[in-house]
Amino acid sequence: MSETAETTDAARTAILEGRTSLGIEFGSTRIKACLVGPDPSEVLAVGSHEWENRFEDRVWTYSLEDVWSGLQAAYADLMADVRRRYDVQPQTFGAIGVSAMMHGYLAFDAGDELLVPFRTWRNTSTGPAAAELSEQFGVNIPLRWSIAHLHQAVLDEEPHVLQIAFLTTLAGYVHWRLTGRKVLGVGDASGMFPIDSTTGDYDARLIGIFDDLVADRAPRLNLAELLPEVLPAGRDAGHLTAEGAALLDPSGVLRQGAPLCPPEGDAGTGMVATNSVAPRTGNVSAGTSIFAMVVLERPLSHAHHELDLVTTPAGDPVAMVHCNNGASELAAWAGVFRRFAAAAGAELDGDAVFELLFREALEGEPDAGGILAYNHLAGEPIAGLAEGRPMVVRTPDSRLTLANLMRAQLYGVYGTLALGMRVLDGEGVELDRMFAHGGIFRTAGVAQRLLAGALDAPVAVGETASEGGAWGIAVLASYLSAADALGLGGYLNDRVFADAGFDTVEPDPDDVAGFAAYLDRYRAGLAAEAAAVDAL
């Protein structure tokens, strides 16, 4: 029997015996499902479903109906891939994990009914609340955090506040419906409310400050009773119920009973997917949003509005630079050029268009020839923008070429992120290596090289760069059976990444100098962005 046939037979047996782990992640544009074998570094099958947020009544949201129809479609796509590869369909799994976009606001009443439409991380309407909480707490509370959304609802005297019985994130909501457990992984929980690193739970002192702050406006609000229970990676977080199995697989093939790991946010699963949970490591995740996670060796000297303090899935402190706007504007420009190619009689698929444009960007001048590209479709707190206005700006003496335009667009993806990373530099935070994952890194050596120049640090990309968080949460599900023997970092090093290969790119001095010049102009040009917000 050939090695390939043996491998296929081994995978088929593991699937039938339920010795696999299923990871599901709700990204901003795709819901992805990933099945791994007893060796979690081995991806057996994948599935996905595209979805998109909606801007309704000036709120960025997803409907709960879309959550479940999208989850079922992604799971069905995964099952189709399993049948195609192995001619079997699993009836159970060794473990399941759910991950999703962090932050946001899902508020339920005592009857488990959603009180207001889901408010995602992308909303920036919580400025007064975030500012007041940051001042009262002495730590930065970003606009997108769940506690900022709750406090803004209190300040705005929204009627639903007095009916709230439970608050959670998207991952916490899906996990709750699948298991009946109102829990959250510590990494995701750290984007709802600050975590006390000594207890691994919500900061009790700050909960007291919040309750006192809202006592007059919402006297029956008791924050500790509203938030999900916090669990570190590896802790039992419940089992798939019969109702949950039917939600995931309406065909009825899937049985109840599989254990679930604590639900996590996309930041935490990105850290796992890139093996960056130890101090002096970090990762960049690029999608609709872009963010960097840097595991800290020591506390920061003081609070910075550009930095969130969150945790790894194991509870270790992390500085997060989160930008609401990532690669969506870049994708829109790729769509324009794809249509141009079609109009010229050259039909190209999306991957081919990105490949061509990215390769062209490498031919651009190091500073993008004086062209500036702003990717702000939504508000961007780090840049001081309450709303987004995507723009391309240039002076009359700039060099407008396709190469420079595309380099500027890629630089634009990193622009706001770089502003936040410069703050970390000022704190003396050192990095041995940054790991990167997300779809834009699928074109080898382009986005990765330009990111290395933007951060002036080595950037590594692994084979799972485009799988990202769905694989990361599958790994966390696998960790359920190993948590007693190994810490998360040891598990990743010894069991998951021992034989993994990473392609590491060192920063090119010309790219470093070119991006620095670009960023100086980018920072100055934010005044034009602000003026556009006021004018349009």
Image (cartoon, rainbow, N blue to C red):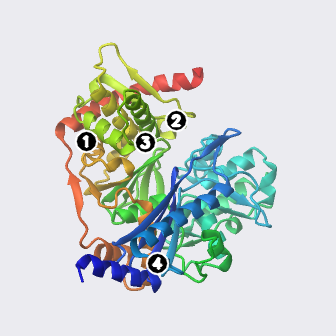
Q: Amino acid at mark 2?
A: Leu
Disc nearer the start of the sequence (3/4): 4
Disc nearer the start of the sequence (4/1): 4
Binning the other alpha carbons within 10 Å of mark 2 as few (below 14), some (14 to 19) or many (20 upward) gives some
Element marked by disc 3: loop
**Which residue is located at x 23 percent, y 72 percent?**
499
* Residue located farthest toward the left when viewing the structure as drawn: 509
Residue corresponding to mark 3: 327
Percent of width and height locating residue 363: 22, 32
118 up-or-down from 516: above or below: below
Binning the other alpha carbons within 10 Å of mark 1 as few (below 14), some (14 to 19) or many (20 upward) gives many
Percent of width and height locating residue 206: 61, 60
457 up-or-down from 517: above or below: below
Instruction: Specify the quadrant that holds the C terminus.
Output: top right
**Which residue is located at x 55 percent, y 60 percent?**
194
Disc nearer the start of the sequence (2/1): 2
- For discs 4 and 1, the disc positioned in front in the rendered view: 4
Residue corresponding to mark 1: 453
Q: In which quarter of the view is residue 487 placed?
A: bottom left
Cα distance between the residues tagged 2 and 1: 24 Å
- For discs 3 and 1, the disc positioned in front in the rendered view: 3
Q: Amino acid at mark 4?
A: Val
Cα distance between the residues tagged 3 and 1: 18 Å
Residue corresponding to mark 4: 88
Percent of width and height locating residue 138: 54, 52
Residue corresponding to mark 2: 377
**Which residue is located at x 48 percent, y 46 percent?**
288
